[in-house]
Amino acid sequence: MKGVIFNVVEESVRAEHGEDTWDELLEAANLDGVYTSLGTYPDEEMTTVVRQACAAFGTSEEDLLRRLGRVGFTALAGRNAQLMSEFTDTRSLLLGLNAVIHPEVRKIYAGAAVPVFEVVSGEARFISLSYRSGRRLCHFAEGLALGAGDHFGEMIAVSQPRCQHRGDDHCELVFTWPAEDQ
C-alpha cells in the first residue's frame, strides 16, 4: 500500500483523536510508522493499525474505515488540488475514478495498486459502482465518497448491497442523492 494512504489515515487519526494518538497506536501495534507518501508498505501494517485503533476507540472496522475515509478526503483533495479542479460535484468525481483519478495516481505513485470501479447503473439521483480490490477497503472508499460529498456541499447516502466482507466476489457501492424537493 502506498504511504500516502498511511499519511491520510495518520492525519485523520490526529485530527479526530489528538496529536499523540497515532504514535500510541503504532507503539501498541509494534510498528515503527515511518511512512513516506511515495513509499510502499505491506497492507498488513494498515490492517494492524486499523485493528489497534478499533480496540482503542471501541468501534467496528467498518465504522472506523468509513470515518477515516470521510475525514481523510480533505487531506487527499488538498494534496491533489489541480486534479480536484477537474470535478464540479461528487457525481463527476465518482464517474472519473477509473478514467481520471486512478491514472493520475499511477503517474504520481509508481506501482500503485488502485481499486477498480465499474459503473453498474446510474440515474439522476443515484450511481451504483462495483468495487474490486484485494485490499477489501470498501468501507474506506465509502468514507472517501462521503467526504467528497462534504467537500462539494452535497448530502449523499451510501449503501452496499454486495460486499466481499459478506462473502460476495466484489462490492457494490450505491450512492444516492436526495430528491431536490425534499
Image (spheres, rainbow, N blue to C red):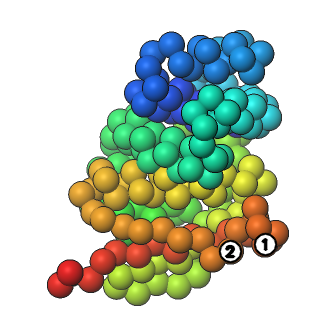
- Tag 2: amino acid: Arg
> Are the residues at dot 2 and dot 1 in contact (C-beta closer than 8 Å)?
yes
Residue on which the image places disc 2: 162
Q: Can see residue 4?
A: no
Element type at marker 2? strand
Q: Which residue is mark 1?
A: 168
Q: Quadrant of the N terminus?
A: top right
Three-letter amino acid code of the residue under disc 1: Asp
Tell me the residue at 41%/68% (across/down): 157
Whole-percent x and y of residue 159? Answer: 53, 71
Name the residue located 62 percent from the left edge and 29 percent from the top edge. 56
| Relative side of 20 to 132, left or right | left
CA distance separating discs 2 and 1: 6 Å
| Image location (x, y in percent) of residue 8 | 51, 33
Spot occupied by residue 34 in the image (x, y as percentages of width and height): 65, 14
Judged left or right of residue 18, residue 124 is left
Q: Position of residue 60 (x, y in %)?
A: 64, 47
Q: How many marks?
A: 2
Judge from the rendering whether residue 11 lies leftward or rightward of residue 109; answer left or right. Answer: left
Label 1's element? loop
| Circle 1 crowding by C-alpha within 10 Å: few under 14, some 14–19, many from 20 | few
Point 79% across, 35% down: residue:
44
Furthest-left residue in view?
181
Q: Quadrant of residue 132?
A: bottom right
The tag earlier along the polypeptide, 2 or 1, is: 2
Local packing at callout 2 (Cα closer than 10 Å; few below 14, some 14-19, many 20+) is some
Give the vertical position of 58 relative to 164 (above or below).
above
Residue 147 in view of the camera: yes
Residue 83's label in the rendered image is: none
Q: Which image quarter is the C terminus in?
A: bottom left
Does residue 31 appear to the left or right of 93 in the view shown? Answer: right
Q: Which residue is at the front of the view, 111 or 174?
A: 174
